[in-house]
Image (cartoon, rainbow, N blue to C red):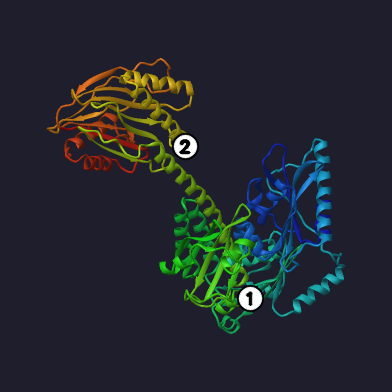
């Protein structure tokens, strides 16, 4: 297996590789072999679910070769790994198969300086290497000794292309040669430990060789334990390209380091440095933004914040709040296609008048945001001259001096565009472009979720509106007021309902109920319950018969949800009400003098449990000036509060309201409840005349 792994890395021209296995019946890939790189670099991805947005997961799931040509493409297509490894490297990912079985995946790594295209010879080397690895994995499984994940993956050092054994006399000559070079030198193995150090390097480090050899530099030298050092070391390993940095050895000695990586480790040259003399001249136009450490912190903040964003407006606000201060940008526009036009979903730093002129423009290649949508490739303009060069019809209206137009990608497809603008010219170096693209990928995924949420939310409200009465009928001799308040969580839809049913000139039916749940199923069942109550009431059934008939319907439907309900038959001529309840909170009756009492109607079983349940009814008088209050439990239930105490508190509140204005009374009662965790429905009825 190690021989086959080393061969595919060598024959493809890669500098390293990762071998994953897919255990039988598992839904995740497990890292088992790391070649040409330290295993710590791959530790965040020891286990990759097949549904994760990662190149090797896509390659295995779709049984195809995935090629990523460099840093910007990785940031655009796979923002999550690009955030952790924002370095210039290329990679391929391919399935490891044996016959029709997929046994794992192979990731190969190249330096970012290579050609952006994968050559035919390289592709053939990858595919043949995967077949060879697949055959070996299958043979191992057939022997009853399958290659399975066992903690830390095996690290496979790769021989140098021109590796050879050095005779002792030549080794001494090489050591003398290195010692004569200006500055100091040391060597690190693939795990980052010092294997060799020159006397000059020892002097520059300020500690003895025994404390250095075998140690990690940032452990032996605490002043090297800074993010910049680790960042450049990781960059050297991942990109397989030389890196440099300067660091302060306390109290006042500056040292310059040059890192030269290859598959066997890293060669390091150390010299003294004078930052005041070696500092590069300031660029004519500002080319740098916040440090990478700051950007990564902001990326973590953005990722955490966007996981909590629900609607599109929430995503737009959170993106502006997080990105503009972090990037030093002054403007942001969030856009998405809709019916062949480019809709602006949110903006910051621009006037409403300017946004209105550009909102809903036809999708056209003459608009950078539209072209980004089509190609999925970001655009960066250092100044207006560059923008005008690519888009001659553009007029300079926003007062900005540099722009980044980024694709918002989710599930591999552009879902929108993000415009970031700056008041001063900006160079957008490669590292910053990759981080901007990664940020846009996070925003794109959040936007995709948010638009789905908004669609469901809109559907929920339209469904709720269709199922609840648009208006209550005007009935002579009766004043009514109704309120519905959705739950503060979820889709804002539930099973609470109310209705007022004209029966004849002097009789009226009133009902209120609550279907278990806060989803579309609950709302759909609510519509069926309301219809059943209406149907039984309009044929002249008494309250007990209305609830019994509705109960039989629900038990026949077997919806798996239970419903509470109150039905009241109001006789306006005799000023009497007949009430029946199915597991619902009892009505409240407020008298003209303010005294409020609970109507002690005998409770019946919830609807939908027993088909032959009976629902006893009782008659109550409706004296002049009274108000009958029907409500759902969301108005009185609260964690840690006794239900009877909560009902008594509601009755006390009802006593101190003005019965002459039912709408004001309803608003007061609704405000009595804190932000609800349940839906609230309220129906107030007062005979008059």
* Residue occupying the point 59% across, 60% down: 83
Seen in the image, is 552 located left or right of residue 219?
left
Q: Nearer the viewer, mark 1 or mark 2?
A: 2
Q: Name which quarter of the figure residue 659 lies in.
A: top left
Q: On the picture, is 330 further left or further right than 226?
A: left
Q: Is residue 225 visible?
A: no
Question: Around disc 1, counting alpha carbons within 10 Å, would you say few (fewer than 14), some (14 to 19), or many (20 or more)?
Answer: some
Give x and y (percent) for residue 72.
64, 64
Task: Report if residue 172 is visible in the image.
Answer: yes
Percent x, y of residue 551? 40, 21
Mark 1 = which residue?
A: 256
Vertically, is 588 above or below 195? above
Q: Vertical placement of 669 versus 374: above or below?
A: above
**Left/right of residue 663 with respect to residue 677 in the rendered view:** left
Q: CA distance from mark 1 to mark 2?
A: 64 Å
Precedes in sequence: disc 1 or disc 2: 1
Report helix, strand or loop for mark 1: strand
Crowding near the residue tagged with mark 2, few <14, some 14–19, many ≥20 C-alpha atoms within 10 Å:
some
Q: Position of 489 compared to 189: left or right?
A: left
Task: Looking at the picture, tell me which residue is in the foreground, 330 or 212.
Answer: 330
Query: x, y (%) of residue 38?
Result: 70, 57
């Amino acid at each position: 297996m190690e021989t086959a792994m080393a061969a595919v890395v060598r024959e493809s021209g890669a500098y390293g590789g990762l071998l994953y296995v897919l255990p039988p019946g598992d839904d995740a890939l497990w890292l088992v072999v790391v070649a040409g790189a330290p295993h710590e670099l791959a530790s965040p991805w020891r286990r990759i679910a097949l549904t994760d947005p990662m190149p090797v997961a896509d390659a295995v799931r779709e049984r195809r070769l995935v090629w990523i040509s460099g840093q910007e493409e990785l940031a655009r297509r796979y923002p999550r790994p690009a955030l952790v490894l924002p370095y210039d490297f290329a990679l391929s990912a391919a399935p490891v198969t044996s016959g029709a079985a997929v046994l794992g995946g192979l990731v190969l790594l190249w330096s970012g300086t290579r050609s952006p295209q994968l050559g035919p010879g390289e592709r053939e080397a990858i595919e043949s290497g995967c077949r060879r690895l697949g055959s070996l994995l299958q043979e191992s499984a057939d022997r009853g000794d399958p290659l399975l994940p066992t903690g830390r993956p095996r690290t496979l050092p790769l021989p140098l292309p021109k590796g050879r054994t050095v005779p002792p006399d030549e080794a001494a000559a090489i050591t003398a040669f290195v010692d004569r070079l200006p500055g100091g030198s040391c060597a690190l193995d693939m795990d980052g430990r010092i294997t060799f150090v020159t006397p000059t390097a020892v002097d520059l480090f300020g500690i003895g060789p025994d404390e250095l050899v075998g140690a990690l530099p940032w452990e032996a030298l605490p002043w090297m334990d800074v993010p910049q050092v680790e960042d450049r070391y990781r960059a050297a390993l991942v990109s397989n390209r030389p890196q440099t940095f300067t660091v302060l050895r306390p109290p006042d000695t500056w040292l310059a380091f040059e890192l030269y990586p290859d598959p066997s480790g890293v060669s390091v040259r150390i010299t003294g440095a004078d930052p005041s003399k070696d500092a590069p001249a300031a660029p004519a136009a500002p080319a740098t933004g916040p440090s990478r450490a700051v950007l990564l912190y902001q990326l973590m903040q953005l990722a955490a914040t966007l996981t909590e964003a629900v609607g599109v407006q929430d995503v737009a606000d959170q993106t502006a709040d997080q990105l503009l201060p972090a990037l030093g940008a002054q403007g942001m526009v969030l856009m998405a296609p809709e019916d062949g036009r480019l809709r602006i979903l949110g903006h910051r730093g621009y006037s409403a008048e300017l946004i209105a002129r550009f909102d809903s423009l036809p999708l056209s290649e003459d608009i950078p945001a539209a072209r980004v949508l089509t190609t999925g490739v970001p655009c960066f303009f250092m100044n207006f001259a560059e923008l005008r060069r690519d888009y001659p019809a553009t007029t300079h209206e926003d007062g900005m001096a540099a722009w980044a137009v980024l694709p918002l990608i989710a599930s591999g497809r552009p879902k929108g565009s993000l415009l970031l603008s700056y008041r001063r010219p900006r160079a957008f170096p490669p590292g910053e472009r990759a981080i901007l693209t990664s940020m846009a990928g996070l925003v794109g995924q959040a936007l995709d979720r948010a638009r789905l949420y908004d669609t469901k939310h809109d559907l929920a409200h339209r469904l709720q509106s269709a199922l609840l009465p648009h208006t209550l009928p005007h009935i002579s001799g009766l004043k009514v007021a109704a309120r519905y308040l959705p739950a503060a969580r979820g889709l804002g839809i539930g099973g609470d309902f109310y209705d007022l049913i004209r029966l004849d000139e002097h009789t009226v039916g009133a009902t209120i109920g609550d279907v278990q749940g806060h989803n579309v199923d609950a709302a759909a069942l609510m519509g069926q319950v309301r219809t059943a109550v209406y149907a039984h009431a309009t044929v002249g059934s008494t309250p007990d018969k209305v609830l019994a008939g509705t109960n039989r319907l629900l038990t026949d439907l077997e919806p798996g949800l239970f419903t509470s309900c109150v039905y009241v038959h109001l006789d306006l001529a005799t000023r009497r009400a007949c009430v029946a309840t199915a597991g619902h909170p009892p009505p409240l009756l407020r008298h003209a003098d303010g005294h409020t009492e609970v109507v002690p109607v005998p409770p019946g079983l919830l609807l939908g449990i027993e088909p032959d349940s009976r629902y006893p009814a009782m008659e109550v008088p409706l004296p002049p000036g009274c108000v009958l209050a029907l409500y759902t439990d969301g108005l009185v239930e609260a964690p840690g509060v006794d239900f009877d105490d909560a009902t008594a508190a509601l009755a006390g509140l009802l006593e101190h309201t003005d019965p002459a204005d039912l709408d004001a009374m309803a608003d007061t009662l609704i405000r009595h409840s804190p932000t609800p965790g349940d839906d609230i429905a309220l129906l107030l009825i007062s005979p008059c005349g």
